[in-house]
Image (cartoon, rainbow, N blue to C red):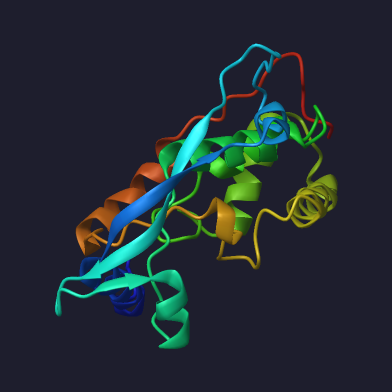
């Protein structure tokens, strides 16, 4: 599969920014209990507060200068806003649990098909067709277009993507150090991923 060099240059630009401005300090912030509940956590009254570190200062590795978020905004500097793995996981689980039981298997599948460049590991129509073929056994060919439209409506309603190639910002996976070879392998491995669909929540076809 051919990978456009422009994709690699775009990811390299992110890498250059993150390499120059590195988080230097941060503050602990309590994760709201409502957010934990939305992600499926069992929240009790006696439970200790859950916290996450949020960067508030960065060091410019070229000048040695310490920069705050306010100073960066005044000077037009775009700082890398690193998100912890726990923060990403909370958001992803909340996104899935916000869906109806019939939507969750497809949404989980779509999220598994993300690449490390903010999009999907295959064209959206290809991913939709694979889901239909595996989850809607025996579907008539005349009904496939209707089902594809239904899945696209789920993506739009749940705000999973901003267009056919780009995930919503909070759901993006970005690896600024990815190589061209890894991008090719990522697309190839997409064809071997298995759709895991719960027997208790069958697809409505």
Count the marks: how many?
0
Q: Quadrant of the N terminus?
A: bottom left
Residue 168 place in picture, x, y as percent: 61, 59
* Residue 98 visible in the picture: yes
Is 2 on the left-hand or right-hand side of 145? left
Residue at left offset 65%, top offset 11%: 46
Seen in the picture, residue 24 relative to 45 is either above or below; the reply is below
Q: Residue at x 66, y 66 (%)?
A: 162
Q: Quadrant of the C terminus?
A: top right
- Measured from the top left, where is residue 194 in percent x and y? 49, 30
Taking the image as shown, residue 201 lies to the left or right of residue 112, namely right
At 76% from the left edge and 55% from the top edge, which residue is drawn?
152
Q: Position of residue 4 (x, y in %)?
A: 34, 75
Picture layout, residue 110 above or below residue 138: below
Q: Can you give x and y, in whole percent of width and height, for residue 62 in the image?
A: 14, 78
Image-quadrant location for residue 33 = top right
Q: Is residue 1 visible?
A: no
Task: Name the one closer to the observer, 178 or 113.
Answer: 178
Q: Nearer the viewer, residue 127 or 157?
A: 157
Is 151 left, or right, of 169 in this rendering? right
**At 40% from the left edge and 88% from the top edge, which residue is drawn?**
75
């Amino acid at each position: 599969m051919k990978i456009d060099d422009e994709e690699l240059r775009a990811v390299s630009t992110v890498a250059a920014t993150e390499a120059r401005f590195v988080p230097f300090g941060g503050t602990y912030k309590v994760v709201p209990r409502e957010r934990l509940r939305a992600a499926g956590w069992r929240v009790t009254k006696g439970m200790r507060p859950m916290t996450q570190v949020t960067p508030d200062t960065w060091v410019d590795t070229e000048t040695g200068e310490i920069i705050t978020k306010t100073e960066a905004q005044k000077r037009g500097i775009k700082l890398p806003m690193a998100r912890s793995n726990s923060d990403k996981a909370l958001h992803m689980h909340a996104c899935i649990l916000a869906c109806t039981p019939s939507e969750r298997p497809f949404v989980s599948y779509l999220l598994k098909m993300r690449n490390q460049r903010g999009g999907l590991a295959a064209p959206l129509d290809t991913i939709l067709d694979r889901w239909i073929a595996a989850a809607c056994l025996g579907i008539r060919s005349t009904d496939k277009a209707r089902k594809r439209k239904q899945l696209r409506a789920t993506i739009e309603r749940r705000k999973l993507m901003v267009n056919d190639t780009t995930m919503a910002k909070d759901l993006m996976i970005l690896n600024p150090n990815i190589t061209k070879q890894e991008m090719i392998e990522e697309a190839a491995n997409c064809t071997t991923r298995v759709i895991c669909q719960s027997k208790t929540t069958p697809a409505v076809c």
